[in-house]
Image: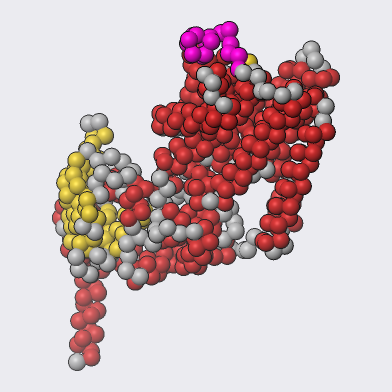
Amino acid sequence: MGEPILLIDGLTRRFGGVVAVSSVTLSVKKGEIVGLIGPNGAGKTTLVNLITGFVPKTAGRVVFEGADITQLASHQIARRGVARTFQIVQPFSEMTVLENVMAGALFAGQRSSIKNAVDRARYYLEFVGLDRFAQFPAADLSLANRKRLELAKSLAMEPRLLFLDEVNAGLNSGELKHALELIHKIAETGVTIVMIEHLLRFVVSVVHRLVVLHHGAMLSDGAPADVLQDPAVIKAYLGTKFAQRHKAELESQRLKYQEQVQQSS
Amino acid sequence: MPRRTTELLRGGALIVVATAVVLFGFGANNYQLQAGTTLAMAVVLCLAWNIVGGYMGYPSFGTAAFFGLGAYAGGIAQTYGLPMGLAWAAAALVGAVFAIVLGAILLRLRGHYFAIGTIAVVEVMREIANNWDALTGGAIGLSLPILAGSPRFAGIFFYLAMWALALLALLLTVAVARSKFGFGLRCIRQNEDAASMVGVDVFKFKVAAFVTSGIVIALAGAIYASMVGFIEPKDAFNILLSIEVPVMVMLGAAGTVLGPVIGAIVYVVLRELVWVNFINFHSAILGVIIVAVIYFIPKGLLREFSLTRWRKWTAPPAPAGQG
């Protein structure tokens, strides 16, 4: 972890009179896992859409690996090494699972042939555990598997920065555990990850840092433990109940730890 | 079957069919030659439409616009004294430029809006041809220099020229189907946002497909103009052509290599049979056939009776559990 891979400066988007994202300034370090949280309509997805070029920016600047990508089109940003998953999964539904992942391998990275794309697609299908569905139509997959497919597709682009937009929403606890392992595995390969997530317990167990958006503006940014204690965050998003419960949990963990220390001494 | 053997078989089949087509041309009577040329033209137009309408999934009704443009571009070039071959090349060039300009505007529209836009283009083009008397001869039409030699020689010549273009269109389709370009077009057909997310330059791909298709259709128009020797706006920019071509492709199977060929053959043969036997109300019968095609075989004959479908029926059940 060291130099910043992504810098966002004063990023703003207005839809008519509504300011969806309001002057957000943020920097993400290489190798970091950042959690992006906030209430519904806080502008999390819009922020990702702005960075990846899916929505035109009203104002502000985006710098990726030292190069200004503010004005680039979405496919150009993708080719530079920024991948994303969509909150509402967007498979190529007439294609097979394998072909879906091939699409990621074919166009984003270095110039690759179809043959090479097949090999890489197989690799990433295995990585996410979908290899046995390779020849299935993408439309036939279950939701959990479609989310994994979305992940495999973006991994096949071999990105250096990956945005995960609620890849875990709608998963059951077993699937969540698997998803958690996957994200750790991806992070180990050196990919920087920014994840939008509503499942707070899940986020806290993965991320190095939490960023909270509220009404399109940045509310808080820091280590998960600090952010979750931030009164502004509690008021806007968490609610006092969660904060108290979380505090109690931390307290009991601390006590348990102290006991252990005392016992061992 | 190993891939290489399949390839060899396909190549062999193509050579056999091509030889048969050429031999037929030399042995055929005038009616058969004309029918054969009409069929070749249908195959060309279907294969060209299939790139945009099939692989890319943009429902274009602009076939007549490119066809008429090619016919007029080639025709006008010939009346100005350009040799036929060069006139055809000029028509291809005009078709390409027109496709770039038109594509840059129309390809921003999707679905029905794109379809309506392309219909409007055909109407506008016909009105221009109707009214620009100095260049197009207006509603009176345009007469082209007649090919030297006997009518029989001309018949065989244009028959072969149209089939050569059909072969070119087929090879082009194979190239598209197997390339990254074709893969990108299929991605675009299914989901443009997702396509651009994986790095497909959606707009460039769409324009490139439109241009490829436009060149081939314009060439068909130019060959047609040289063949018939006389073109007029309502004939060159005939909206019926714009409708028949997608119907033929859908009949065969859109977005496949052989679907457009099969569709063109089945439709042209049907049309010919209906026309010969029910001359009074053949268009009504054709209309019923069109509705039946859309209703009963929306995916096309090729998919309806394909090997893969057969394999799907006989395939073992899906692996259990998706966890």
Between residue A4 and residue A16, name the one nearer to us.
A4
Image point (79%, 12%), residue name: B280
Q: Quadrant of residue B68?
A: top right
Residue B177 pos. (x, y %): 58, 48
Q: Quadrant of the N terminus of chain A?
A: bottom left
- How many labels sit on residues? 0
Magenta residues, start to end: B129-144
Residue B267 lies in quadrant: top right
Viewer-closest of A93 and B124: B124
Residue visible at 63% across and 36% down? Answer: B165
The residue sitting at 23% across, 91% down in the picture is A264
Quick check: is B133 in the magenta stretch? yes
- For the C terminus of chain A, the image quarter is bottom left
Where's residue A30, x and y in %? 24, 65
- Secondary structure mostly seen in the magenta stretch: helix
Choose between A248 and B262: the one closer to the eye: B262
The residue depicted at 30 percent of the width and 63 percent of the height is A192
Expressed as whole percent of the image width and height from the top left, the position of residue B181 reads 50, 47
The percent position of residue B135, horizontal first and vertical second, equals 49, 13
Tell me if residue B59 comes above or below residue A190 in the rendering.
above
